[in-house]
Image: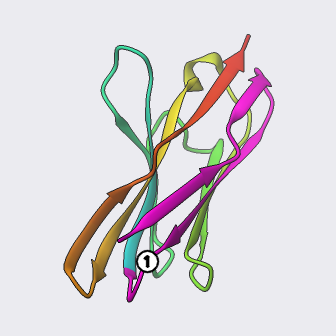
Amino acid sequence: QVQLMESGGGLVQAGGSLRLSCAVSGSELKINVMGWYRQAPGKQRELVATITSGGSTIYAGSVKGRFTISRDNAKNTVYLQMNSLKSEDTSVYYCNVKGYNWAGPVDSWGKGTLVTVSS
């Protein structure tokens, strides 16, 4: 079973910063892609950023230049540094991992962490 533990959400003023973390655990787990998605009330879940095991990254246009995704492969942990936060960044942020383990392909989600940006 794959478990994802997110942390770092909270309330911040516009222009401020937050850092999200997601620690992943699981038996014989090989992670290929780690990522962050977000879902605001009444909207669909959208990609924020992803990072491969080799360090290649993809960012949503709305966060490029403000957010930075990184990962520690030894700790199976992915981070999202969010700077210059805007009110429109207010969402529940979800961690996602894709890879495989002894049972087959893995595509798992965390429970989400709320980020609220006040203007």
Taking the image as shown, residue 5 lies to the left or right of residue 100, namely right
Residue at 70 percent across and 45 percent down: it is: 8
> Image quadrant of residue 46?
top left
Residue 21 lies left or right of residue 52; in this view the side is: right
Residue 6 on the magenta segment: yes
Relative to the observer, which residue lies in front, 14 or 27? 27
Q: Residue at x 44, y 22 (%)?
A: 40
Q: Is residue 23 left or right of residue 1?
A: right
Magenta extent? 1-30
Quarter of the N terminus within the rendering: bottom left
Tally of numbered tags: 1
Report if residue 95 lies within the magenta region: no
Residue 58 in sight here: no
Picture layout, residue 32 above or below residue 69: below
Pick the front one: 23 or 15 = 23
**Looking at the image, which residue sits at the far top?**
119
Camera sees residue 77: yes
Which residue appears farthest toward the left when viewing the image?
104
Give the overall secondary structure of the magenta segment.
strand
47 displayed left or right of 64: left
Residue 20's place in the image compared with 14, above or below, is below
Question: Helix, strand or loop at disc 1?
Answer: loop
Q: Is residue 77 above or below residue 42?
A: below
Q: Position of residue 45 (x, y in %)?
A: 34, 33
Which quadrant does the C terminus fall into? top right
Q: Look at mark 1 in the image and give the residue it sits on.
A: 26
Give percent across and percent down for residue 10: 72, 32
Q: Residues within 10 Å of mark 1 (few under 14, many from 20)?
A: few
Q: Which residue is pictured at 67% across the width and 38% down the height? A: 9
Question: In terms of depth relative to the viewer, which is nearer, 96 or 55?
Answer: 96
